[in-house]
């Protein structure tokens, strides 16, 4: 499954379009490197999301769904949060 679709299906980002824009802006990294929207995701991959206000979320992919839709209840079983960091306050 493509990373842009995974971000949408898992509920980490609201739409595939938003995921594509975040990837293009360099706000999404996988396994320590930059990605394209078409980069495939596999189990065990570590994805880092940088949010607009500067906070970061690092997740590990637990499972990749076979379909393009997953129930809200199942979304959180697709990944685990490894680390969250807040932006510095000035």
Image (tube, rainbow, N blue to C red):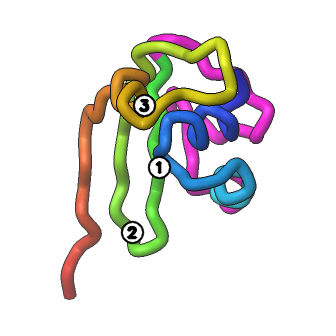
The local crowd at label 1, few if under 14, some if 14 to 19, many if 20 or more residues have their Cα within 10 Å, is many
Q: Earlier in the sequence, mark 2 or mark 3?
A: 2
Q: Provide the residue span drawn in magenta.
A: 23-44
Q: Secondary structure at mark 1?
A: strand
Q: Is residue 45 magenta?
A: no
Toward the viewer: 80 or 84? Answer: 80
Q: In the image, what residue occupies the spot 68% across and 40% down?
A: 4
* Of callouts 1 and 2, the N-terminal one: 1
Q: Quadrant of residue 26?
A: bottom right
Residue of label 2: 54
Q: CA distance from mark 1 to mark 3?
A: 17 Å
Percent of width and height locating residue 76: 35, 31
* Callout 1–callout 2 Cβ contact below 8 Å: no
Residue 27 in the image: x percent, y percent? 57, 56
Residue at (54, 28) in percent of width and height: 70
Residue on which the image places disc 3: 75
Left or right, 20 with respect to 46, comes to: right
Identify the main secondary structure in magenta. loop
- State how many labels appear: 3
Magenta segment includes 27: yes
Q: Where, by quadrant of the figure, is residue 39 drawn?
A: top right
Q: Residue 31: image x %, image y %? A: 51, 27
Q: Is residue 56 above or below residue 73?
A: below
Contact between labelled residues 3 and 2, with CB atoms less than 8 Å apart: no
Residue 6 against residue 86 in the figure, above or below: above
Q: Quadrant of residue 56?
A: bottom left
Tell me which residue sits at (79%, 32%) in the image: 38
Q: Which mark is residue 49?
A: 1
């Amino acid at each position: 499954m493509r990373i842009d679709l995974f971000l949408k299906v898992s509920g980490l980002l609201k739409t595939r379009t938003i995921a594509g824009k975040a990837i293009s802006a360099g706000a999404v990294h996988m396994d320590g490197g930059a990605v394209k929207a078409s980069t495939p995701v596999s189990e065990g991959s570590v994805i880092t999301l940088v949010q607009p206000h500067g906070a970061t979320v690092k997740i590990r992919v637990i499972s990749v769904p076979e379909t393009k839709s997953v129930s809200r209840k199942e979304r959180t079983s697709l990944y685990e949060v490894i680390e969250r960091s807040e932006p510095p306050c000035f």
